[in-house]
């Protein structure tokens, strides 16, 4: 259908909302098959973030716009051979904001087919964003405070044991280092992902790396093991891309710090701030080769 790989193209509509449409299936885009939950291909939450960022550029023009208050309503499963027609609806802009929603239905269903709401949030123009100061992030300090570290294979085995199976496109963490309340990793991207970075505001492989690093902020069990439960992303307060990541000329790190107060094992939910760090940070002793 052309257009943005996840947003698609704008289609005519009688409604005031702008409607963008595309088709997603287990191997379209090809990397989706590498994101599986409990044995089924599932569209990652990071894809809805990217849809919002892409829609913000379509709505407001170029700029450092944000996706805010994104809520994941229902997972979008993509069984082999069952493509889904996906529509992103963007409401008219008001005071620098616009609501957006992502729905899908089985491709080929008639006009009376059932549409499922998968995600809903807001896009915000950069001029209306509350100014925030980036924190000073010292990964070497995190490493000094580390209480656990896992190699790449060890960490992805932990995730696989909890039903989160990642193929090559999403196996992007080169291990993980964690302290009591924060964690970080250096990212290693598959060449096929690197070649696509310029097509996206925040490629889902990078966005999902944030979710995977956040999992490293879930409090450990009393015996030092990782929580036996599977934590899934349900909401995102704000995402802003301050500079595009379009190559790997300098290392990329992901850092997450837990903000939710409950630090006991297996809490009901975990809320963390996550940062993708590129050119303007320098990490002399991050601890990865």
Image (cartoon, rainbow, N blue to C red):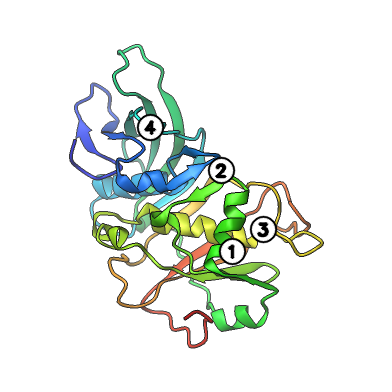
**Which one is closest to the eye, mark 2 or mark 4?**
4
Disc nearer the start of the sequence (4/3): 4
* Residue at image mark 4: 80
Numbered label attached to residue 218? 3
- Few, some or many C-alpha atoms within 10 Å of disc 4 (few <14, some 14-19, many ≥20)? few
Disc nearer the start of the sequence (1/4): 4
Return the residue nearer the eye: 94 or 49.
49
Which type of secondary structure does the marked residue at label 4 adopt?
loop
Kindly report the distance in space between the C-alpha atoms of the residues bearing marks 4 and 3.
Answer: 32 Å
Residue 186 percent coordinates (x, y)? 47, 72
State the residue lying farthest toward the bottom: 284
When the figure is inspected, residue 179 is found, relative to residue 172, above or below; the finding is: below
* Residue at image mark 2: 234
Residue 106 percent coordinates (x, y)? 36, 23
**Which one is closest to the eye, mark 2 or mark 3?**
3
Return the residue nearer the eye: 200 or 56.
200
Kindly report the distance in space between the C-alpha atoms of the residues bearing marks 1 and 4.
Answer: 29 Å
Work out whether residue 184 can be spotted: yes
């Amino acid at each position: 259908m052309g257009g943005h790989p996840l947003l698609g193209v704008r289609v005519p509509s009688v409604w005031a909302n702008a409607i963008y449409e595309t088709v997603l299936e287990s191997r379209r885009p090809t990397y989706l098959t590498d994101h599986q939950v409990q044995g089924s291909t599932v569209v990652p939450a990071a894809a809805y973030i990217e849809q919002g960022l892409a829609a913000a550029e379509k709505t407001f023009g170029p700029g450092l716009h944000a996706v805010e208050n994104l809520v994941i309503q229902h997972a979008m499963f993509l069984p082999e051979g069952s493509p889904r027609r996906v529509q992103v609806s963007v409401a008219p802009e008001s005071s620098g904001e616009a609501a957006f929603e992502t729905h899908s239905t089985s491709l080929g269903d008639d006009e009376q087919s059932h549409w499922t709401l998968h995600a809903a949030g807001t896009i915000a123009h950069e001029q209306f964003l509350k100014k925030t100061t980036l924190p000073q992030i010292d990964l070497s300090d995190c490493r000094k405070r580390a209480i656990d570290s896992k190699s790449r294979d060890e960490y992805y085995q932990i995730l696989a044991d909890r039903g989160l199976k990642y193929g090559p496109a999403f196996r992007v963490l080169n291990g993980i280092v964690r302290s009591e309340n924060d964690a970080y990793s250096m990212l290693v991207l598959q060449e096929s992902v690197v070649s696509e970075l310029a097509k996206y505001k925040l490629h889902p492989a990078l966005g999902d790396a944030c979710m995977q690093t956040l999992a490293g902020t879930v409090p450990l069990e009393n015996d030092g093991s990782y929580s036996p439960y599977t934590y899934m992303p349900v909401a995102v307060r704000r995402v802003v891309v301050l500079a595009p990541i379009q190559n790997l000329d300098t290392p990329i790190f992901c850092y997450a710090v837990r903000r939710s107060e409950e630090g006991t094992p297996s809490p009901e939910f975990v809320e963390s701030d996550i940062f993708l760090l590129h050119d303007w940070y320098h990490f002399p002793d991050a601890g990865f080769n």
